[in-house]
Image (cartoon, rainbow, N blue to C red):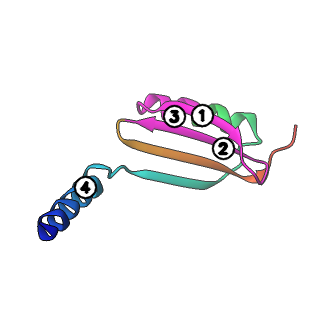
């Protein structure tokens, strides 16, 4: 009985590992304080089929843009602290 439970647990864990594989791309070298850079980023990602999922300031006060496409995610973080 214990061997069957161990086998079942192993199969479940392996299935979770292989089905939850999504690509995440992190890019942290853009100057997102520049409005022209933000505009180009939005236009280029939109033309490639990416959808804007979120925009926020992280704990370091840097601007973060998150884009989703199918099971992939792109995260753009400003290289500089965001100032108004």
What residue did someone put label 3 on?
Answer: 44
Residue at point 86%, 43% (across, down): 83
What residue did someone put label 4 on?
Answer: 18
Q: Quadrant of the N terminus?
A: bottom left
What residue did someone put label 1 on?
Answer: 54
Residue at point 22%, 54% (across, down): 15
Q: What is the crowding at mark 2: few (fewer than 14 residues within 10 Å), some, or many (at least 20)?
A: some
Residue at the limit of the structure toward the bottom, as seen here:
3
Dot placed on the residue nearer the N-terminal end, 1 or 4: 4
Secondary structure under tag 4 reads helix
Q: What is the crowding at mark 4: few (fewer than 14 residues within 10 Å), some, or many (at least 20)?
A: few
Dot placed on the residue nearer the N-terminal end, 3 or 4: 4
User: Where does residue 34 sit, x and y in percent of width and height?
Assistant: 76, 40
Report the disc number at residue 11.
none
Dot placed on the residue nearer the N-terminal end, 3 or 1: 3
Closer mark to the observer between disc 3 and disc 4: 4
What residue did someone put label 2 on?
Answer: 64
């Amino acid at each position: 009985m214990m061997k069957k439970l161990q086998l079942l647990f192993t199969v479940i864990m392996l299935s979770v590992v292989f089905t939850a594989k999504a690509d995440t791309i992190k890019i942290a070298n853009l100057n997102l304080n520049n409005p022209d850079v933000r505009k180009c980023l939005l236009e280029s990602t939109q033309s490639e089929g990416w959808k804007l999922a979120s925009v926020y300031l992280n704990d370091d006060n840097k601007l973060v843009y998150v884009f989703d496409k199918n099971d992939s995610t792109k995260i753009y973080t400003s290289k500089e602290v965001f100032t108004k």
